[in-house]
């Protein structure tokens, strides 16, 4: 083998590509640092795969599909059973890697892995999930039935904020349905998905069934236009998701894009104050606000507007520190660039006249002076035209809007371009029922701050938060990763005679 010039002079560990069952060094000239957001330590360098490497990954997936699609259901399910056992066994190792490259606390990193693990558990019941339908005697001696068949090579493009859960939303469900897969994880935290891929191979996923390439826009565009890719599952921002959806569908692919958010939590004055405010503060500032389902707008209705000082007092108790440290509530944001973007939005909020109730901009964390920290920040008096209201901030920031009625709150939320998640805090069943009926948002929580569905339901989304009809897990994902074939059959008894040429289409 000729020496790989791409590795010359490289001191940090290199992230590998996974092609046809082997972890291989890229020969690319483009490498990016994977950085610990609490310390700026370079953990590894990730290659942006060449066009030839992307083609090789897709070719491996295409070749493997020929046999994998006919692998018995039970054999596929058994691999998922093994994978779930391995992920469980290696949970703390995965969580430590995840925390180092993403910044989350260890407890939150374990939650990230666990929510993905639940999808692997769901994949184990593929035997009953992938069943077709059967109707006997749709006409005399005629039966009709459906087959749910895999669709070919599928691809996944994932964001930085859940480097375990979101890859696990995708490849287990795609491959358990009989497809093969090419994953392109976020270039900001690719080490966690690589650990999951190692476990998948150990569990028995055959060569070529799961492949991983790394990269940015060029790799994403190659996936969207590649003639041998049948379907793409994307999770990330609305701008990139819309691009992926448009380019992918123009090239004949089935695409689902789960995208950005601005999640409103509505607090009615009859809510259980202590429980609701605790939930709100956790849902806003946990994971440094970098959850697609984080509460980003708090809507206080009527008398509940008096609770602002209580919210501020609770936010002040949160401990900002590196995710690796005991007792941390709020870790760093993912990168220096993300920190600068968030600080710019906070400046906009001040300039536009919102009241800064709690200012986390100047925070210093002892021992982690280089970390990308922003302390919990709260604005009140926010109006729907302010940039801090219209833009997804994706940081530890709460914007508070005051309204007088539940109707006003519903109207505000339904006018927002995003429709990912929302919540209502109340003790009134009538108010809750009205809210769930009238709100146009994918995930609704009633006294539940981050209503991410468990895997037997599907993750949904409305308006600017989702493109494509079907969600990434639950029953919908089986439809996404399969196509239905409808067979109408009649069997002639050898002794049957008669009949004649029939020129009508009726089966009566
Ligand atoms: P992102 O859109 O920047 O990146 C997502 C993926 O697209 C990554 O793999 C990245 O490499 C790639 N990418 C980045 N820029 C690109 C470009 N110009 N062209 C093509 N591909 C590009 O998102 P992110 O910052 O990694 O993640 C945060 C975003 O993801 C937030 O908007 C958040 O709300 C959203 N998100 C949504 C959900 C959901 O289920 N709705 C879940 C998690 C995150």
Image (cartoon, helix red, strand yellow):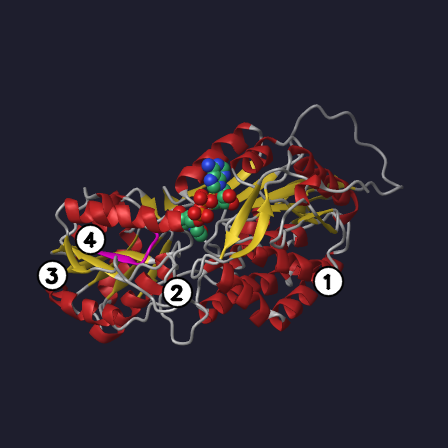
Looking at mark 1, is its residue's CB closer than 8 Å to ligand 1? Answer: no
Q: Secondary structure at mark 4?
A: helix
Going from N to C along the chain, the mark reached first, 4 or 1, is 1
Specify few, some or many for label 3: CA neighbours under 10 Å numbering under 14, 14-19, or 20 or more.
Answer: some
Name the residue beneath numbered marker 1.
202
Specify few, some or many for label 4: CA neighbours under 10 Å numbering under 14, 14-19, or 20 or more.
Answer: many
Q: Which label belongs to residue 409?
A: 4
Q: Are marks 3 and 2 in contact (CB under 8 Å)?
A: no
Depth check, mark 1 against mark 3: the one in front is 1
Of the four image quadrants, the one with ligand 1 is: top left
Q: CA distance from mark 1 to mark 2?
A: 37 Å
Residue 316: % across, % down: 23, 70
Going from N to C along the chain, the mark reached first, 3 or 2, is 3
Depth check, mark 1 against mark 2: the one in front is 2
In this view, the residue in front, 243 or 14, is 14
Q: Is residue 319 above or below residue 15?
A: below
Going from N to C along the chain, the mark reached first, 3 or 4, is 3
Name the residue beneath numbered marker 2.
368
Specify few, some or many for label 1: CA neighbours under 10 Å numbering under 14, 14-19, or 20 or more.
Answer: some
Depth check, mark 2 against mark 4: the one in front is 2
Residue 37: % across, % down: 44, 58
Quarter location, residue 26: top right
In this view, the residue in front, 250 or 33, is 33
Residue 278: % across, % down: 27, 71
Q: In the image, is 150 to the left or to the right of 322? A: right
Q: CA distance from mark 4 to mark 1?
A: 50 Å
Q: In the image, is 381 to the left or to the right of 429? A: left
Residue 220: in magenta span = no
Q: Is residue 146 above or below residue 227?
A: below
Q: Which label belongs to residue 302?
A: 3
Q: Are marks 1 and 2 in contact (CB under 8 Å)?
A: no
In magenta, the rendered stretch is: 394-399
């Amino acid at each position: 083998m000729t020496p790989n010039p791409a590795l010359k002079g490289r001191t940090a560990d290199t992230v590998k590509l996974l092609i046809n069952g082997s972890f291989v060094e890229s020969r690319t000239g483009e490498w990016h640092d994977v950085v610990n957001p609490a310390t700026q330590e370079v953990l590894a360098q990730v290659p942006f795969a060449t066009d030839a490497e992307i083609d090789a990954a897709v070719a491996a997936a295409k070749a493997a599909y020929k046999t994998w699609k006919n692998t018995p259901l039970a054999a596929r399910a058994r691999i998922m059973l093994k994978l779930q056992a391995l992920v469980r066994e290696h949970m703390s190792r995965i969580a430590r890697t995840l925390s180092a490259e993403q910044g989350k606390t260890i407890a939150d990193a374990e939650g990230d892995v666990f929510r993905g693990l639940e999808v692997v558990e769901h994949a184990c019941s593929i035997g009953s999930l992938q069943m077709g339908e059967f109707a006997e005697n749709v006409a005399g001696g005629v039966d009709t039935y459906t087959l749910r068949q895999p669709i070919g090579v599928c691809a996944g493009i994932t964001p930085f904020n859940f480097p375990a859960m979101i890859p696990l939303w995708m490849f287990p469900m795609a491959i358990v349905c009989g497809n093969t897969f090419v994953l392109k994880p976020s270039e900001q935290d690719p080490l966690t998905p690589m650990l999951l891929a190692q476990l998948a191979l150990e569990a028995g996923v055959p060569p070529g069934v799961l492949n991983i390439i790394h990269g940015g826009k060029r790799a994403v565009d190659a996936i969207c236009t590649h003639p041998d890719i049948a379907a793409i599952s994307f999770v990330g921002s609305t701008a990139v998701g819309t691009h992926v959806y448009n380019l992918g569908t123009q090239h004949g692919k089935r695409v689902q894009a789960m995208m950005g958010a601005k999640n409103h939590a509505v607090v009615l004055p009859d809510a259980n104050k202590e429980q609701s405010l605790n939930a709100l503060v956790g849902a806003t500032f946990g994971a440094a606000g970098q959850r697609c389902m984080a509460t980003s707008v708090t809507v206080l209705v009527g008398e509940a507007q008096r609770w602002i000082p209580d919210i501020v007092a609770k936010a002040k108790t949160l401990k900002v520190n590196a995710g690796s440290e005991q007792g941390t509530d709020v870790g760093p944001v993912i990168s220096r660039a993300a920190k600068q973007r968030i600080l710019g939005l906070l400046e906009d909020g001040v300039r536009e006249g919102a009241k800064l109730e709690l200012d986390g901009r100047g925070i210093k964390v002892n021992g982690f002076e280089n970390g990308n920290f922003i302390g919990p920040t709260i604005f009140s008096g926010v109006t729907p035209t302010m940039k801090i209201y219209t833009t997804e901030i994706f940081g530890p920031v709460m914007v508070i809007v005051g309204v007088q009625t539940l109707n006003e709150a519903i109207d505000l939320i339904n006018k927002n371009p995003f429709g990912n998640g929302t919540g209502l805090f109340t003790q009134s069943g009538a108010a809750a029922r009205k809210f769930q009926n009238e709100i146009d948002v994918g995930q609704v929580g009633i006294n539940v701050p981050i209503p991410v569905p468990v895997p037997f339901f599907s993750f949904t989304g409305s308006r600017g938060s989702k493109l494509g009809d079907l969600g990434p897990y639950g029953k919908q994902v089986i439809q996404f990763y399969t196509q239905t074939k409808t067979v109408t059959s009649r069997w002639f008894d050898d002794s049957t005679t008669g009949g004649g040429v029939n020129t009508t289409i009726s089966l009566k």
